[in-house]
Image (tube, rainbow, N blue to C red):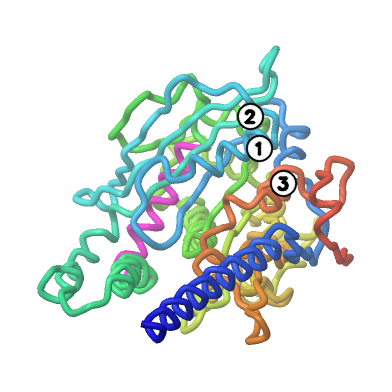
Amino acid sequence: MMKKISLLTISVLLSGCASFGEGVATAFLEKQEQEDLRECRVDGKGFGGMQQSFDESSHSLKVLMVHGVGTHVPGYSTQFKEKLAVELQLPVKSSRYKEIHLVNKEFPDQGLGVLRIERLLNKGQQSREMLFYELTWSAITNPEKEKLKYDTSGAYSFHRAEVNQMLKEFSNDTSPDPMIYLGKSKEEILASFRTAFCWMVGRDWDALPDYSESECHIDGDAIKHLPDDEYAIVSHSLGSRIVMDGMHSFAQRMVIASNGGYTQLESGVLDGFIDGFQQKSIPFYLMSNQLPLLEMGEEPPEVINQQKEYCVAGGEHYNKRLVNKTSIIAFSDPNDLLSYAIPQHFAEHNLDSRLCAEITNVNINVAHVIDMFGFGKFANPLTAHTGYDSDDRVVALIANGIGSDKTSELISERCKWTEFVD
């Protein structure tokens, strides 16, 4: 009897110790997160963020969002868009969104995804307007990924552990996208980007249809606001490669159009479009940037190592540039296994010189780094890959930039900046 009582006592004590130990561990880990010592380091030239675009625009700021790997449905950017609206002080928004089902005559039998558009405004006179264009291109790659559905069916998942099954479903949904993009679907996805960009450039809010399945054409009326509008592009993961390839394809097509080839611009407006666009400085905010990874095995653009010729006034090809400047702000978490900073020489050797690119790297921990009781430090790589658009510092940098009097207090307190000069 005493032996049974002793065993019961030991069991209770061990159980209590385990609970106590678990409580201590949980409290310790939570304390590390509450202290929030996550790194934020900015290396490059200062940038004004979207606030600067408002200062320079007498009409609208137009923002295009492009997602990365994995199946997305329209509305995926809601959290980011709402946090951005708060940071930009745009509390008023349209009571409805407008939706464009993208089509392009180059791919008559292929739907190219959905472009959803919302309008955000400041209070009072509503003098500041942001049109937010959310591109969803998943419809292009989803049919190909259906071929892997058998792998997560009962016939194969029956012998798989539950957590591993969830990881397998995630892997089967995300890992094929880069291969599909670099394979047979690249041109369709780039056509999706170009068509979305066409709708963004071409019309203001009132001129946009509530719903459309029509092609996009830019006519004389559609580009009347081009000198006054400001543009910004935000992407995530594979989206970084899509938007840069998309801009490169724009540069190629402008050359073809100048020689009388295919263009989405109606006759007579090409010169006005090119002249207007060459005055634009467009920021690209690349979250979980993957450009160095996805350049592996690819041929470089036709025009490289010619920044001075294309981008400096008086240069030999200055009037052939696509834009005045492309500011690339590349966000990467060092614990994100799929993101990379961009070396400064990367733009010279891997980006089209006609984009006049300028690189700023933001090295930022979006996932908490936790000390595992002397066994080393750990950060969740999934959070490190997907947590950018919900991170207050990332949103604050995109909204208010760094190095100006409008830089947010959060960034001034939490981010270290090494300024680059020419």
> x, y (%) of residue 294?
49, 75
Circles 2 and 3, Cβ within 8 Å, touching? The answer is: no
Label 2: which secondary element:
loop
The answer to which image quadrant residue 29 occupies is: bottom right
The answer to which image quadrant residue 215 occupies is: top left
- Residue at 72% of width from left, 33% of height from top? 54
Question: How many badges with numbers are in the image?
Answer: 3
Is 137 displayed left or right of 63 in the figure? left
Query: Badge 3: how crowded within 10 Å, few (<14), some, or many (20+)?
Result: many
Q: Earlier in the sequence, mark 2 or mark 3?
A: 2
Work out whether residue 151 can be spotted.
yes
Q: Mark 1 points at which residue?
A: 230
Which residue is farthest front? 1
| 96 over 78 or under it: above or below | above
> x, y (%) of residue 409?
84, 45
The answer to which image quadrant residue 274 occupies is: top right
> x, y (%) of residue 228?
67, 30
Q: Name the quadrant of the N terminus.
A: bottom left
Q: Which of marks 2 and 1 is nearer the N terminus?
A: 2
Segment colored magenta: 180-200
Q: Mark 2 points at which residue?
A: 60
Query: Badge 2: how crowded within 10 Å, few (<14), some, or many (20+)?
Result: many
Is 406 displayed left or right of 234 in the figure? right
Amino acid type for the residue under numbered disc 3 = Ala
- Residue at 58% of width from left, 27% of height from top? 120
Question: How far apart are labels 2 and 3 at the CA level?
Answer: 20 Å
Amino acid type for the residue under numbered disc 2 = Ser
Circles 2 and 1, Cβ within 8 Å, touching? The answer is: yes
Q: Nearer the viewer, mark 2 or mark 3?
A: 3
- Residue at 47% of width from left, 64% of height from top? 238
The dominant secondary structure in magenta is: helix
